[in-house]
Image (cartoon, rainbow, N blue to C red):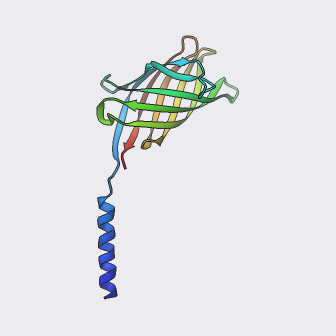
Amino acid sequence: MNKLFTLALCGLLSLTTTAQASPDCHEVRGTIVAYLAAPAATCPMGTISGLAGDVFDASNNLIGTTTACLTSLEPQGNNGALHATLMHTFIFTAGELDGATIGTQDNAVLSPVDPPLLFRVNNRLNVTTGGSGFLRTHGTVNFGNGEVTLRYNGRICVGN
């Protein structure tokens, strides 16, 4: 009887586990075009948004927008590099992630290309709200005209 109860319990637990929704995961890549903007009340160090922080897929289709809040920007080492931390919000309006909104926390290194205006960006964005996963971005930021141009790739999971 005890053995039968244990088998029944194990079967019930396995049904419960398989009945739970699994995340909808996507390998993503594309480009982001945005511009540096003035600080805001909720983001005193500066914001990054765009025309309006447009997010494109690998086929150059507009799939959403992003805004970012710069939370710190400090010198790193003695070669002119900068370390930045940011928080992003991505709102997807088309494509595989249509309807999803995710938030990230980022750690970026800005390496001087033509200082003090042009820097190469290498950033890792960890999804913290609205799903799970990560993005990596690589590109440039021009502090002269405010343009931020990035290529991204990664994996984003949404849903439960």
> Residue 156, position in %: x, y?
39, 40
* Nearest the eye: 85 or 98: 98
Quadrant of the image for the N terminus?
bottom left
Residue shown at 33% from the left, 62% from the top: 17
Left/right of residue 48 with respect to residue 9 in the rendered view: right
Residue farthest to the top, as pictured: 145
> Vertically, is 61 above or below 155?
above
> Residue 74, position in %: x, y?
67, 28
Left/right of residue 86 with respect to residue 103 in the rendered view: right
Residue farthest to the bottom, as pictured: 1
Left/right of residue 97 with respect to residue 89 in the rendered view: left
> Vertically, is 9 above or below 26?
below
* Nearest the eye: 36 or 112: 36
> Vertically, is 2 above or below 51?
below
Residue farthest to the right, as pictured: 78
Residue shown at 30% from the left, 35% from the top: 96
Residue shown at 43% from the left, 31% from the top: 90
Q: Quadrant of residue 120?
A: top right
> Residue 151, position in %: x, y?
43, 26
Left/right of residue 150 with respect to residue 39 in the rendered view: left
Q: Number of labelled discs?
A: 0
> Residue 55, position in %: x, y?
39, 25
Residue shown at 70% from the left, 27% from the top: 78
Q: Quadrant of residue 31?
A: top left
* Nearest the eye: 89 or 148: 89
